[in-house]
Image (cartoon, rainbow, N blue to C red):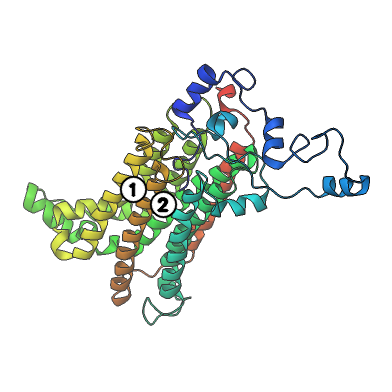
């Protein structure tokens, strides 16, 4: 969830690049070559060749010095020293240089950059969820059923979605400065992982939560319609159609959302953060039956655990969306929250809280399902769908990686 949001915009900071920075060279911005020398102790650095006129050091020792310069930490850059695509709205400093090595990227998790806490705010939850799902699936935390029992297939799908989206977010934020193409690839994969997670949630809902709703019980719904509206209506057909179509529609929605988010990284997208936030809110509509259940059938009394955790989850999601779109607090005081406290870190924290609450009611739904399973999950209806989605998402990501600039095709 790194960039369900992610660094595709540059916002105001980018608009200042043309007016105040004037491009590299006209405003004193360090050129890439000079920046590399300053950061890595290149040929013009003190102590290197050409640093002084007459050195008394023997030739052999000087050659050794040149061959093995002392390692120096990579200098952090300002917004006007990195490519425009790397600039985040209202984040003025703390940028890592482009073309870092993988080793430098790994070392940066312990250095104060503007990506450090983006990594840790999803890596720590990744470890927490690994522990939780390990207990549920492998240590018999879900009951007496073994880990390979068909009843746990939706939970395996859901766990893979949660863990993949956190792992991909960490990867995207950690290695985004390897190269521009790899940065785009990582964030496209990040968007795909979020869509994968959204669909996996729908798989878990369709087996563990939706069958227990009165809204999807034909007899209960027909009786409700007759009492409220006075209509003699058999609701079995629309309910059966919904049950049959919920997963195919969710799969199509996941593919469409990924394509829209990948396209939002094109230069022609004026409001990428708003687009991505809206697009990733669309799959939440698959949980509408639970909302309608609370309005029509008093979910708060019948299933208080689901009611409390479900609505608290959506409160966290609304707060996360607010920070992701508004870019508060860095919008109020640009430069002050470059390293700690900017909106993307807060976005990560509140998305973690939302998923943490979701795990609570999915686990509770699993416990009820194991008491009286209404329909046994099948490999085709769970793992089969997940594999098909992975194939579709791979096609989408590959297509966008092969398009250098979508705007040129419009």
Whichever of labels 1 and 2 marks the residue nearer the N terminus, that label is: 2
State the separation of the CA atoms marked 1 and 2.
8 Å
Quadrant in the picture for the C terminus: top right
Residue tagged 2? 198
Asked if residue 392 shows in the view, the reply is no
Q: Residue furthest bottom?
A: 144
Q: Crowding at label 1, few (<14), some or many (≥20) Cα neighbours within 10 Å?
A: some
The part of the image, by quadrant, that contains residue 325 is top left
Q: In which quarter of the image is residue 11?
A: top left
Left or right of 61: which side holds 268?
A: left
Considering the numbered disc 1 on the image, is that residue within a helix, a strand or a loop?
Answer: helix
Measuring from the top left, give residue 211's x and y in whole percent.
Answer: 28, 63
- Asked if residue 359 lies left or right of residue 139, the reply is left
Compared with residue 135, is residue 390 higher up or lower down, i.e. above or below?
Answer: above
359 or 129: nearer the eye? 129
Splitting the image into 4 quarters, where does residue 27 fall? top right
Of the pair 260 and 72, the residue shown nearer to us: 72
- Check the image and report above or below for 105 versus 27: below
Question: Which residue sits at x=47%, y=50%?
Answer: 117
Residue shown at the point (14%, 57%) measured from the top left = 297
Dot 2, how many residues are within 10 Å of its Cα: few (below 14), some (14-19), or many (20+)?
A: many
- For label 2, the SS is helix
Q: Are marks 1 and 2 in contact (CB under 8 Å)?
A: yes
Residue under numbered circle 1: 284
**Measured from the top left, where is residue 196 in percent x and y?**
47, 52
The image position of residue 123, as x and y in percent, is: 48, 58
User: Which label belongs to residue 99?
Assistant: none
Is residue 395 visible in the rendered image? The answer is: yes
Left or right, 397 with reference to 69: left
| Residue 2 position (above or below residue 16) | below
């Amino acid at each position: 969830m790194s960039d369900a949001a992610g660094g595709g915009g540059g916002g105001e900071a980018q608009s200042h690049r043309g007016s105040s920075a004037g491009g590299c060279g006209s405003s004193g911005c360090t050129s890439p070559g000079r920046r590399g020398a300053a950061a890595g102790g290149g040929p013009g650095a003190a102590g290197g060749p050409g640093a002084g006129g007459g050195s008394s050091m023997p030739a052999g020792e000087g050659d050794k010095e040149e061959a093995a310069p002392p390692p120096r930490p990579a200098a952090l850059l300002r917004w006007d020293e990195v490519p425009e695509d790397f600039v985040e709205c209202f984040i003025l400093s703390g940028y890592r240089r482009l073309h870092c090595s993988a080793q430098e990227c790994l070392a940066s998790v312990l250095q104060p950059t503007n990506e450090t806490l983006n990594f840790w705010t999803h890596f720590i939850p990744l470890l927490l969820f690994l522990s939780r799902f390990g207990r549920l699936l492998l240590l018999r935390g879900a009951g007496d059923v073994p880990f390979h029992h068909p009843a746990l297939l939706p939970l395996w799908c859901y766990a893979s979605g949660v863990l993949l989206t956190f792992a991909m977010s960490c990867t995207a934020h950690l290695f985004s400065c390897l190269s521009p193409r790899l940065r785009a690839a990582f964030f496209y994969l990040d968007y795909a992982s979020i869509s994968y997670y959204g669909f996996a949630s729908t798989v878990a809902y369709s087996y563990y939560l939706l069958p227990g709703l009165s809204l999807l019980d034909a007899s209960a719904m027909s009786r409700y319609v007759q009492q409220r509206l006075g209509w003699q209506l058999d609701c079995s057909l629309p309910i059966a159609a919904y049950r049959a179509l919920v997963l195919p529609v969710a799969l199509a929605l996941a593919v469409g959302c990924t394509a829209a988010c990948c396209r939002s990284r094109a230069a022609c997208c004026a409001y990428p953060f708003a687009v991505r936030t809206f697009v990733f809110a669309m799959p939440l509509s698959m949980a509408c039956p639970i909302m309608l259940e609370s309005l029509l059938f008093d979910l708060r009394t019948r299933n208080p655990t689901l009611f409390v955790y479900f609505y608290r989850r959506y409160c966290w999601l609304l707060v996360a969306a607010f920070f992701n779109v508004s870019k508060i607090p860095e919008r109020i005081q640009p430069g002050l929250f470059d390293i700690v406290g900017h909106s993307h870190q807060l976005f990560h924290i509140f998305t973690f809280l939302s998923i943490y609450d979701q795990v609570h009611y999915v686990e509770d739904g699993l416990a009820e399902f194991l008491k009286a399973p209404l329909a046994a999950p099948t490999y085709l209806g769970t793992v089969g769908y997940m594999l098909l989605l992975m194939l579709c998402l791979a096609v989408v990501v590959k297509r966008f990686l092969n398009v250098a600039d979508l705007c040129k095709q419009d």
